Amino acid sequence: MLKAYRYRLYPTKSQVTLLEQTLEICRWVYNDTLALRKNAWEQEQLSISLYETNKILTQWKRERPELKLVHSQVLQNAQMRVDFAFKAFFRRVKSGETPGYPRFKGKDQYDSFTFPQSGFDLIEDRLHLSKIGVVKVVLHRPIEGTIKTLTIRRSTPGRWYACFSVEYDLLPVPQKESVVGIDVGLESFATLSNGEKIENPRFFRTDEKALAKAQRKLSKAEKDTPEQKKARKIVAHVHERIANRRLNFAHQTSRQLVNRFGTIVFEDLNITTMQKNHCLAKSIADVAWNQFITVTMSKAEDAGSRVILVNPKNTSQRCSRCGMIVAKTLSDRIHSCPHCGLAMDRDQNAAINILRLGLQSPG
């Protein structure tokens, strides 16, 4: 099994310069590799493999000495990213999806580089990076397992993070018998089939005024001035703070759920279609249901739990007692069935229906 760990880095000014230099060199390798493969196909209908681009990289190193300032496997990984981009493009073409052709990376668009196997070493709270030096890292939790890869990422506000991919053995955990259906929403973040509610933290709404103020300053700043650069960094910082709070909430809430319940049932929602409702799009984006469900699924196996996704059709309209359809609008917060007399919170009624569908699903 694979697990990811992310830690904040505190590089010195000289190390920041080296990190930025590494990103820029990797961006050059990425763009030139993409151009090489693109031109070879358009001009000669030749498909260049990853192995062939790796050989060309050796020639580039002789022509451009600055490439030697970056660890060799880091440069090869930049070419691997191009290969992944083309494979994803052709997969989408084959499956009939809308294909997005691999794009060149502009300045500041290439924000990470990866050590696939070697070139780094973690000793206590110091991260040794080849060609860069020893960088201080805040290990807020211990790493369990064998480190396989390391990705150094720069966030938009300019913070640096170390992201470790770790392989570990999954220990057998007794399966819990408790089950729950969960109806995610906007009024409450989630309603459980047992009647419990998880309040909606509304992270974006809470920081919306601060974000609007920062964006106004950015719009008034003159182009290509230090003031504009500073204002852009403040806007990015607010966005990052919102995203971090949202992710932290998803991790903490999902951990509580997988520790309590052996089977957790969610609706398999089409978020993209739901966000076409412009009145609700901002609120739907703020709750980040997909992120929450994905995080819950990643934690479930470790905790001896499982997550089931069910068809959301009529879960809010159907009566959980008699099964009859009771039409409601979004403003109707109480489910009141004229057929069997059941009256209860509409979200709990939906959660009970979701649980029933999950228990009926094959396997």
Image: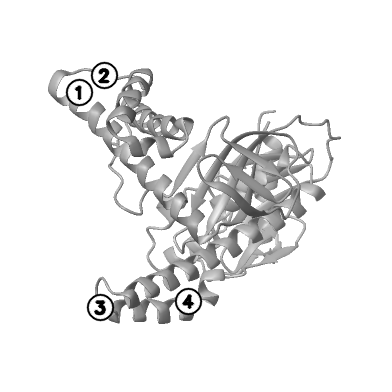
Disc number for residue 208: 4
Q: Which label's residue is closer to the chain start, 3 or 1?
A: 1
Give the residue type that dot 3 points to: Glu
For image coordinates 31% across by 41% down, the residue present is 28
Q: Nearer the viewer, mark 3 or mark 1?
A: 3
Which callout, 1 or 2, points at the residue further toward the start of the chain?
1
Q: Seen in the image, is 199 located left or right of residue 222? A: right
Q: Are marks 4 and 3 in contact (CB under 8 Å)?
A: no
**Spatial separation of the CA atoms under disc 3 and disc 1:** 43 Å
Relative to the observer, which residue lies in front, 197 or 326?
A: 197
Q: Secondary structure at mark 2?
A: loop
Q: Is residue 193 left or right of residue 73?
A: right
Residue found at x 56% / y 57%: 11
Mark 1: amino acid: Trp
- Contact between marks 2 and 4 (CB within 8 A): the answer is no
Q: Position of residue 343 (x, y in %)?
A: 70, 65
Dot 1 and dot 2 residues touching (CB under 8 Å)? yes
Q: CA distance from mark 1 to mark 2?
A: 6 Å
Which mark, residue 41?
1
**What element does badge 3 sit on?**
loop
Residue under label 2: 47
Given residues 82 and 338, the one toward you in this image is: 82
For label 3, the residue is: 222
